Image (spheres, rainbow, N blue to C red):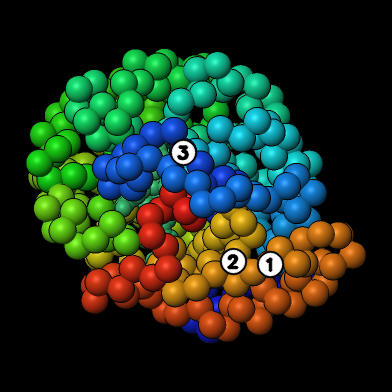
Amino acid sequence: MSQLQDNFGRRFHYLRMSVTDVCNFKCTYCLPDGYKPEGKPKFLALHEIENLISAFAEVGTEKIRITGGEPTLRKDFTDIVRIAADNDKINTIATTTNGYRLEQHAKEWYDAGLRRINVSVDSLDPKMFYQITGENKFDSVMRGIDAALEAGFERVKINAVLLKGMNDQDLPRFLHWIKHTPIDLRFIELMETGLGREYFQAHHLAGMDIKQQLEQDGWQFDQPSASDGPAQNFSHEDYKGRIGLIMPYAKNFCASCNRLRVSAKGKLHLCLFTENGVDLRDLLQDASQRPELIERLHGQLNQKKETHYLHQGITGVTQHLASIGG
Ligand SMILES: Nc1nc2c(ncn2[C@@H]2O[C@H](COP(=O)(O)OP(=O)(O)OP(=O)(O)O)[C@@H](O)[C@H]2O)c(=O)[nH]1
Ligand SMILES: C[S@@+](CC[C@H](N)C(=O)[O-])C[C@H]1O[C@@H](n2cnc3c(N)ncnc32)[C@H](O)[C@@H]1O
Ligand code: SF4
Ligand code: SF4
């Protein structure tokens, strides 16, 4: 079966698979009032996840990121990792987490086949961490990161959303941390969502300012490899860690788009800010449906747009990134 490709020559070998919308944090830029269930949600079951992964693997997916909401709140999270690990076409299994369950489970997940972990830490000041996430869990998340480093994860990345008036004074602390710690620290520009323009305008900070500062301080731009996503990465000989900048408002950000998303209820999203999701669930029930599922995926790829329309304030169907996994 042929590789998933769109009309702009971009190839898609990376699936971001959301497994739940539920989250226990209340990040001000994502779920400021916490997760609010609409009825009794029915998230993808293990057999649906297995059929989904098998179909994507057949059309060239090599990397799967398990995301959410908070993916690790699923009691069968380790089974999900195992399902992905059992597929020999998938060579990278990653997750993005708020770190809530990391301290207790890092080793178990590693043993199940998880190899990369991205942890959201918006501030290294415990008070600011609480103010942003609504949870007093800073120390436990940091112990979780230590546990992940000890468990042997190939890559531990830290995500911090840049927020004017909140964590914008934290750069020196972050730099101090990665001087001797081998992690990849990524600053993500705040993206406008259904939360509204007011929050965005009050807190958006351009990543370009940080880029200029890093370059002045001797950080070197790392040439991206073909499989890299849209983050711009920098390294410095005096630092063990690296820095990545995710700047979705920057020119050509989408040119290297290499990822597709499936929501926790089984909808394909061609872009993080797509206008609608396409239901796949009817074709996830049995392995025999795989050819039909693959045909639907190929058909949809023709619809993928060249870029997002965030500059025009068009944020699509996604009310907040917890509903699609970021
Ligand atoms: N606009 C946009 N933002 C993205 C995209 N991919 C990641 N991001 C943003 O970056 C955040 C962090 O992404 P992660 O979940 O850590 O995954 P990643 O950047 O693909 O990570 P790696 O696979 O380690 O490069 C996401 O939650 C989004 O906010 C993308 O394709 N488009
Ligand atoms: C939606 S969360 C899901 C995974 C997990 N709960 C976590 O926080 O890592 C994935 C990522 O999206 C980022 N994110 C959420 N809302 C965002 C926004 N409006 N702009 C930029 N990044 C956002 C978070 O910081 C997090 O790193
Ligand atoms: S960013 Fe992650 S941890 Fe924070 S509210 Fe959203 S889903 Fe939850
Ligand atoms: S905004 Fe959409 S098109 Fe652009 S990189 Fe992200 S997912 Fe791809």
In the rendering, at what x and y percent does residue 45 appear?
73, 47
Residue holding disc 2: 268
Residue 306 relative to residue 200: left or right = right
The crowding category of the residue bearing disc 2, from other C-alpha atoms within 10 Å (few below 14, some 14 to 19, many at least 20), is: many
First reached walking from the N terminus: tag 3 or tag 2:
3
Please name the amino acid that badge 1 sits on: Leu
First reached walking from the N terminus: tag 1 or tag 2:
2
How many numbered discs sit on the rendered protein? Answer: 3
Q: What separation in Å lies between label 1 and label 2 (alpha carbons)?
A: 7 Å
Please name the amino acid that badge 3 sits on: Cys
In the rendering, at what x and y percent does residue 48 appear?
75, 53
Question: Image point 44% across, 49% down: which residue?
Answer: 322
Residue 310 in view here: yes
Cβ at disc 3 under 8 Å from ligand 3: yes
Question: Image point 33% across, 26% down: which residue?
Answer: 135
Q: Nearer the viewer, mark 3 or mark 2?
A: 3
